[in-house]
Amino acid sequence: MKRSTRTKINRGILYAILLVALGIVILLADWAAIKENFFDVAVLETLWPEIVTVAAKNTIVYTIISFVGGLVIALVLALMKLSPIGPYRWIATSYIEFFRGLPALVVIIGFGFAVPIAFGWRPPGGTIGAGIIALIVVSGAYMAETIRAGIQAVPKGQSEAARSLGMSSSWTTVSVVLPQAFRIIIPPLTNEFVILIKDTSLLFVLGVAASERELTTFARDAVTTNQDSSPLLAAAVLYLIITLPLTRLIARLERRTQRAR
Amino acid sequence: MTAATAAIEVRELHKYFGDNEVLKGIDFEVAHGHTVCVIGPSGSGKSTLLRCVNLLEAPTSGTIVVEGIDITDPETDVDAVRSRIGMVFQSFNLFPHLNVLGNLTLAQRRVRKRSKDEAEEIARQNLDRVGLADKIDAFPAHLSGGQQQRVAIARALSMDPDMMLFDEPTSALDPELVGDVLGVMKELAHEGMTMMVVTHEMGFAREAGDKLVFMDGGVIVEEGDPTEVLANPQHQRTQDFLSKVL
C-alpha cells in the first residue's frame, strides 16, 4: 500500500470516530431538559435589562477598581523586592508568598467578615468594598511578580546609560526602566485583568445589596427565584462577551512582541 | 604632565569582582584635551578601568580624581560628576521607547534643568555635529548601528561634558559602518575634547591618539606615544598582542 493511501485511510478512520461520538451525544442528550432548564425565554426576559445595566456593569467596575488598585500595590511591591535594603525585600517577599499561597475566596471572606467582626472595622463602600479590597490585595501580589520580571527584563545597559548621563536612580527608574518594563508586561497584565474579571464572581459569598450584585451573584439569585438555570447561561454568555475580545487581544500583543524580537 | 593639569588621574586603583582581582594597582592619567586609547586582550581590565572612571564600577581601593574632584570620596555627588563625563557604550544603549530627540533631551531636562526649547536647540546642534540632523524624529530601532552610535555620541555631547569615555564604540558595528563613527570621534579629538577610548581600532589610536596604553592581566604593561608603541613595542606581551591584531 502506498504511504499516501495509508494516510488517507487513517484520517478517514479518525473522522468516522468523531462523527460516531457526535451522533451518540446528540442521540443521548435530553434536549427537552436542556431547552427548559437553560433556554427558558420567559425566564431570560425577566433578567433584562438589569443583567447588563447592573450585573455586567458591576462586574466591569469591580474589575477595573481591583486592577488599578492591585497595579499600584504591585508596583510598590516590585520596587521593594528589587530594593538594596534587605527588610524591604523580605516584607515584599512575605506579602507576595502569603497572598499567592491563599485561595482568593479565603481572603475575600477574611476582609468581608473576619476583619470587620474582629476589629469593628467598617470597610469603605460596605461589605462589597471589603471584597474589592481583598481582590486588590490578592491581585497586587500576583502582578508584583509580573512587574518585577518586567523590570529585570530591561537590559542593564539602559539604566547604566541613564546613570552615566547623571540621572538619579529614581529618575532612571521612572523615565527609562518603567516605561520599557510596562511594554514588556502588557500581555501578562492583560491576562491578569481577565483572571480578575472571573475572580469578581467570588464576591458572591459576601451577600450584598441588589444594586451591588455582579454577574454571578445576580445569576445565582435569579436561578433560585425561578428554579431554572437559564440565568446562569445568560451570565456565562456575558462573561465570554467581556473576556473573549481581551484574550484575542493578548494573543495579538504576544505575536507582535515576538515579531519585534 | 603634573597632577594639577590632568583631567583624569588614577592612583593605585584596585578592583575585585569577588575573589577575582581585575585591576591590580593602576596608575594612569589623561591630560586635558588629550585622547588616550587603551588597548589590550579581552579580560585585561581595560573596560573595567574605563567604567571605574565614572563609577559604573565601584573601585575596591585607590583614588580617581576627575577635574580636581576625588570621585572615590564617599561625600562626592556621583550624579553631578557623571553628568560632566560623557559615556559611549559598545551596545549604544539608546532608549528604545524615545525618539532621537527624546534621547538627546531627557537628561538635559532632568539633570541640567534646561527648558524644552533650549534642550531641543542643543540637541539639534549636536545631531548636526554627528551628521544626523535629518533623523531627529526617528526611533532607535529604525537606525543602523552606526547611526545609533552617532546618536549616542550626540546624546553624551548634549550634556556639555568635560570629557568623553568610549567603551569599544565600534566593536558591535558592521565593518562598513565603523568609519562614520570613527570620523565623528576624530573630529572631537581635533576639537580638543578630552577622551579616553577603549578600542581595537589601531588606526584610530595612531591617527587621533595622544597616548596609547596597553593593558594585560589587570596592569598597565606599556604606555607612550601611539605611533611609537605600535611600531616599536618594548614588552614581550605587547609585541605578542600586536602581532595578533595588526
Image (cartoon, rainbow, N blue to C red):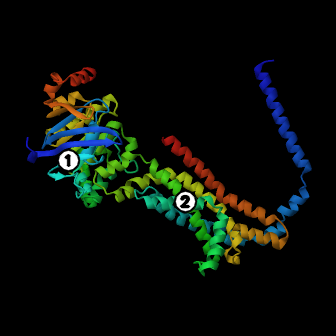
For disc 1, the marked residue is B64
Identified at 25% across, 38% down, the residue is B24
How packed mark 2 is, by other alpha carbons closer than 10 Å (few <14, some 14-19, many 20 or more), is many
In this rendered view, identify the residue nearer to me: B38 or A258. Answer: B38
Identified at 59% across, 57% down, the residue is A192
* CB-based contact (under 8 Å), mark 2 and mark 1: no
For disc 2, the marked residue is A96
Left/right of residue A122 with respect to residue A38 in the rendered view: left
In this rendered view, identify the residue nearer to me: A36 or B165. Answer: B165
Q: Which quadrant of the view contains residue A204?
A: bottom right
Horizontal and vertical percent for residue B172? Answer: 34, 34
User: Residue farthest to the top?
Assistant: A1
Horizontal and vertical percent for residue A49? Answer: 72, 71
Horizontal and vertical percent for residue B229? Answer: 16, 26
Looking at the picture, does residue A46 appear above or below residue B33? Answer: below
Left/right of residue B209 with respect to residue A164 in the rendered view: left
Q: Chain of mark 1?
A: B
Residue type, numbered disc 1: Ile
Horizontal and vertical percent for residue B214? Answer: 21, 31
Residue type, numbered disc 2: Ile
Q: Chain of mark 2?
A: A
Left/right of residue A42 with respect to residue B185 in the rendered view: right
Q: Is residue A96 visible?
A: yes
Q: Is residue B100 visible?
A: no
Identified at 85% across, 70% down, the residue is A227
How packed mark 1 is, by other alpha carbons closer than 10 Å (few <14, some 14-19, many 20 or more), is many
Left/right of residue A147 with respect to residue B35 in the rendered view: right
Looking at the rendered image, the quarter that the N terminus of chain A falls into is: top right
